[in-house]
Amino acid sequence: MWLPRPVADSAEPRSRSRRFSAHYATNRRGRNLDSIQEKAGSSKTEITDEVRAIDQIADKYSEDKSALIQILIDIQDKFNWIPKIAIVRVSERLEIPISLIYQIATFYKFFKLAPRGRHLVRVCLGTACHIREGPKVMEAVERALGVEYGDVTSDGKFSLERVNCLGCCALGPVMVVDKDYYGNVKPMDIGKILAKYD
Ligand code: FES
């Protein structure tokens, strides 16, 4: 049985976020996948700019089935997430069942199957940060953004996620916006931190 090459960066299995669960709930119950598969089998995907971009990525790897994970990584780099149309189109181009691509994309936490905001906010709720009031920091961020973790703000500006350790426990509680780390964060700091991002 064919299996894609594993990639070190995406080796950690996904723990499902609330946002992810909501977005793909029907798929997890096995409903939408069947209809997507039928649709893909009965008619070819309409060629849009989005599909052309996906084709360029598939072309780069000469439609090599063993490059599936790398193709998904490139698609995520391009769109900032993996839209459903990408799964359908990759299935057509590589002749791999949609259900298998979906299984792989959902297994690796690295892959994002729901739209992400322009800025990614991650709040650590690992043990060290938790005992240093990480949950209060999370509540303050949720209040400031008007969303719960796992969600994207309605203007598409911020995605909010929780993480279990960012590797700098001594600085807890820690939050990260994109690549900027903030340590010893207090709930009252949140507004000032978020205001730095357009
Ligand atoms: S527990 Fe938060 S950085 Fe390690």
Image (tube, rainbow, N blue to C red):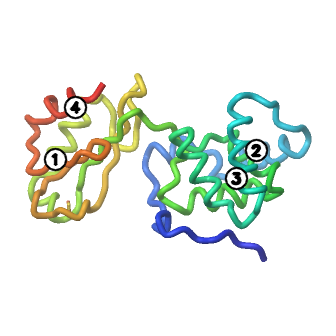
Above or below residue 46? Residue 133 is below
Tell me the crowding category of disc 3: few under 14, some 14 to 19, or many 20 or more residues within 10 angstroms, Cα based.
Answer: few
Which residue type does callout 3 highlight?
Answer: Gly
- Assess whether mark 1 and mark 3 are in contact (beta carbons under 8 angstroms): no
Height in image: 193 above or below 59?
above
193 left or right of 65 in image: left
Q: CA distance from mark 2 to mark 3?
A: 19 Å
Q: CA distance from mark 3 to mark 4?
A: 39 Å
Distance (Cα) linking label 2 and label 4: 37 Å
Q: Is residue 145 above or below residue 179?
A: above
Query: Residue 71: which quarter of the image?
Result: bottom right
Q: Secondary structure at mark 1?
A: strand
Q: CA distance from mark 4 to mark 1?
A: 11 Å
* Residue at image location 20% in from the left, 40% down from the top: 139
CB atoms of marks 2 and 3 within 8 Å? no
Which quarter of the figure is the N terminus placed in? bottom right
Q: Amino acid at mark 1?
A: Tyr
Instruction: Classify mark 3 as within 8 Å of ligand 1 or not, answering yes or no.
Output: no
Q: Where's residue 59, x and y in %?
A: 75, 49
Say what amino acid the circle numbered 2 marks.
Arg
Of the two numbered discs 1 and 2 on the same chain, state the one appearing first in sequence. Answer: 2
Q: Which residue is mark 3?
A: 30
Which residue has dot 1 on it? 182
Which numbered disc, 3 or 1, marks the residue closer to the eye?
1
Location of residue 73 in the rendering, given as x and y in whole percent from the top left corner: 57, 53
Residue visible at 71% across and 67% down in the picture = 66
Q: Quadrant of the C terminus?
A: top left
**Label 4 crowd bin: few (<14), some (14–19), many (20+), radius 10 Å:** some
Query: Which is nearer the N-term, disc 3 or disc 1?
Result: 3
Q: Which mark is residue 89?
A: 2
In the picture of the structure, the residue carrying the numbered disc 4 is 194
